[in-house]
Amino acid sequence: MTLTREISPDARKDIEKFEEQLALYLAGDLDAEVFRVFRLNNGIYGQRQQGHNQMVRVKVPYGALTAEQLEVLATIADTYSRGWGHITTRQNIQFHFVQLERIPDVLRELASVGLTTREACGDTVRNVTGCHLAGACPFEVLDISPWAEAAYRHFLRSPIAQRLPRKFKINFSGCATDCGQAMFNDVGVVAVSRPRDDGTVEPGFRVFVAGGLGANPHPAQALEDFTSREDLLATIESVLRVFDHHGNRDNKLRARMKWLVDTLGIDEVRTRVFKERRFLLASATWPGGLPDVVLERSDAPAGVSTAIDATPVGTPVTLRLSRDGDPYQGWETANVVRGAAKGTVSAYAFARLGDITTDQFRALAAIQRDFDAEVRVTNRQNLVFRDLSEDQLHDLHRRLEAIDMAEPGAELARDVVACPGADTCNLAVTQSRGLADDIGRALEAAGLADVGGVRVNISGCTNSCGQHHISDIGFCGVERRAHGRSAPGYQMLLGGHVGQTQIEFGEKALRLPAKNVATAVVTLVERFAGERTAGETFPAWITRSGGARAIGTELAHLDVFPTPDDGPEFYVDFDETGPYAAEVGASECAT
C-alpha cells in the first residue's frame, strides 16, 4: 500500500493507537470486552459470521463526498472487502468482511482523503446527517451544509462525546420539509425564520430533541420556538451535556435521550438544557457565536425567492412515468430537481439496495471530476450530483446508464430501502436485502416500479435501521411459527411519514410470510395508483381507505403458510439454502 496524501496528526494518532490496542488484543493482553468498546468507538464492529470478520462504517458528514474520496472507497471495496460498499440511511458508507488485522490499513486509506470511522459506532456522537440537497434546494431557509460541518468538527474527538450513556444522533434540515428527517433524532435542527421588529426576517433554527426509532419510536419535541444562529452549537452541546449527566447508564435498553424525556418530562429537560447553555461560556468547549466554517462558506440559501415565477420544480407526489416513454425523459422527470430562483440543477443516481460496486465508485468519481459537480449520498441510499448545468444532463444520463445507475428511481416505488439484515447483522432475524430485491422485481414485473409517492422500507429486526416506522409501507423482520416449524416473516406497517416538522409512525396492519410480502406490496401500490385523487398522499389514501388495520384485514388471505411439503420455499429465507432459523447474536451497534 502506497499513500501519497498527507494524514492529519489527529488521524495518525487514532490509527497508531488502534494498531497498539489491536496488537495487545491479538496477543491476549487486552480484555476482549475492553477491546470491543474501543473497537466500536472507532467505527468497527463484528459481523454475525464471527471470527475476525468486521464491518467498517465510514462517516460521511451530511453525505458530502469528493472524487478523491470516491476513488479511495473503491480501493477499500476492492482490496479489503467484497467488491462493493453499502450506503446507509444515515449517510455512512459500510464495508463488510474486512479482516480485523487489516483495519489499520483501511483507516490509513480513509484518513489520506480526510475520511474517518471514528465515533461512527459506539456510545458516541454519531455521523452528523443533513439534507442531501442543502445549498441547492428550492425551499431552504438556510444552507445547513456548513452548520452540519461545524457540528461534525466540534464533536469529533471531543472529550464530552466519547463515553455517553448511549449513542447520540444529530441531524440538520434546511426547511420544514425536513428532507433530513430531523423528527426522529436525539437532536434535530430545522432552519426557520422569524420577523424582526424592523420588518426584516431573521433566519435561524428550531431545535427538536429526544426523537428516536427502534422498538419504541418516539417523536422529537421542540426545545424552544427559535434558536439564533449564534446560539445553535451551544444549544446542541447543552443537550448533549444533559444527556451525558442524566442519561441511564444502568440499562442500555432505556438509555437513549427519548427515555430521559420519558423519565424527567420534557419541561424538566428543557430547564436543564437552558441552565447548561446559560453557563456554557465558562467551559473550555464553549462553541458560541458563528462557527468559522459558516463564516468561510456562508449559509445563504441557494434557492429561495419571492418572485412570482420562481416556482420550484421537484418530483410531484402523484407522478407515474410512462413505461413506453423515452428513457432520458423518464429519468429527467423523476431524478432532476431544479431550484428556480438561482437556477440550481441536481440529479439523482440510483443505487439499487444502496450498493455501489468498485467500478461504479470509480465511474462516479470520474463523472464528478468531468462535470465539476458536487456529490452527496442520500438517506434513501442513493447519490445526487449537484451544481450541474442544463446542458450536462443528457451526457450525465448517458454515463449513468453505462454503469446501471440511471433508473428513474428517486422517490418512486422501486426505490426500496433495506438495512443489511441477516446477511451480516447480529441482531437481524430476516434477510431484508433479499426481500427488498424480491419486492423490486415484483413491482417491475407488474409495471408499478415507476409509481411515485409511495416508499417501501425494510428492517431485519425491530431496531429500525431500515427506518420502517416512517415509511409509507414498512416491514420489520419477525420469526413466525407454522406447522411446527420456524419461518421468516414480517410485520407490515402502513402510513408512516416525516415532513413539515411532523412525524407519523406507521400503524401495524398484519403479519405476513416473507414469501408473500412482495404480493402484498404489489396489491397496495396498484390500488394506490388506481384510486388516489390528484395530489393525494399515500398516508391520506390509507386513512380514506379505512386505516392500516382495515387494509390488513383485506390482505389477510396472504397470511397463510402452506405445509412444509406443499411450500418448502416458505421455510427458507431469501438468499439462504437451508431451513430458516432465527439466529440472534449479541448486540454491538443496533440503531
Image (cartoon, rainbow, N blue to C red):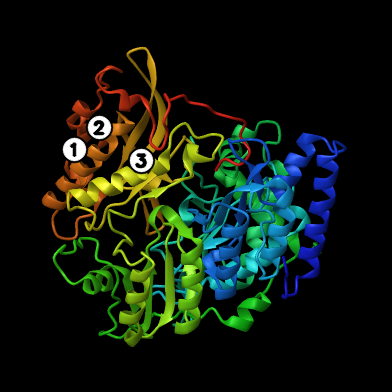
Looking at the picture, how far across and down is residue 547, in whole percent?
Answer: 23, 38
Label drawn at residue 435:
3
Mark earlier in primary sequence (3, 2): 3
Question: Which quadrant is home to the N terminus?
Answer: bottom right
Label drawn at residue 546:
1
Label drawn at residue 549:
2
Residue at the extreme top? 484
Using the rendered view, name the quadrant where residue 129 is placed.
Answer: bottom right
Q: Is residue 469 left or right of residue 495?
A: right
Q: Is residue 28 left or right of residue 305?
A: right
In the image, residue 393 above or below residue 477: below
Q: Residue at x 53, y 51 (%)?
A: 185
Looking at the picture, how far across and down is residue 186, in whole percent?
Answer: 56, 50
In the image, residue 20 above or below residue 345: above
In the image, what residue type sits under mark 2? Arg
In the image, what residue type sits under mark 3? Leu
